[in-house]
Amino acid sequence: MQDEKRQEMAKGVLSNPRNQRQEVQALQDTIYVIGGKWRLPIINSICNGNKRFRDIERSIPGITTRMLSRELKDMEANQLIRRTVIPTIPVAVEYTATEYCQSFGDIILEMIKWGKQHKERIIHTTDQ
């Protein structure tokens, strides 16, 4: 069943005849937008309810303030997150995932699933 589902998805995504240059470019575009060490953890943090800068920062071990700031700006430019300034005293800023970002949710779940399976595979392979 999984192979049939994958083949059906491939028919909808891949061109016929296949255009490898276009496929590689699409992969590179995706990696550019969500790649790097911090983007997916930031998306995950925001999608898990962290909206304030410090909350996001605390939820991601090892990220620096400067790096988080830079990544949030890039992610906003790529329409993955929305930055909202709340006119309070002091001014508050909240970050939320856009609908466009949420469309990536299934892929993130599959990546988490694959990562867990991979870790189990490696652990069991090294135990033998």
Image (spheres, rainbow, N blue to C red):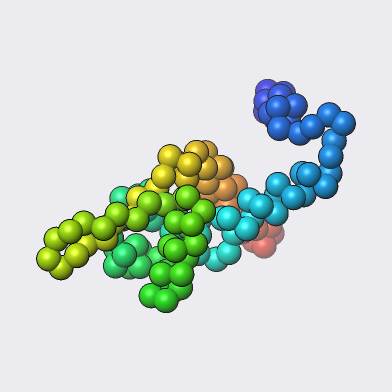
Residue ranking furthest to the front: 87
Q: How many marks?
A: 0
Is residue 3 visible to the viewer in this orientation of the structure? no
Front one among 115 and 69: 69
Front one among 14 and 75: 75
Front one among 90 and 117: 90
Quarter of the image where the N terminus is located = top right
In the displayed structure, 97 sits above or below 61; it is above
Q: Is residue 21 left or right of residue 121?
A: right
Is residue 15 visible to the viewer in this orientation of the structure? yes
Q: Is residue 110 left or right of residue 122?
A: left
Residue ID at (14%, 61%) = 88
Give x and y (percent) for residue 53.
Answer: 31, 65
Residue ID at (34%, 62%) = 56
In the displayed structure, 4 sits above or below 111; it is above
In the displayed structure, 17 sits above or below 81; it is above
Residue ID at (68%, 57%) = 125
Quarter of the image where the C terminus is located = bottom right
Give x and y (percent) for residue 111.
Answer: 57, 48
Give x and y (percent) for residue 51.
Answer: 30, 55
Residue ranking furthest to the left: 89
Give x and y (percent) for residue 32.
Answer: 62, 58
- Which image quadrant is residue 5 in? top right
Residue ID at (31%, 50%) = 49
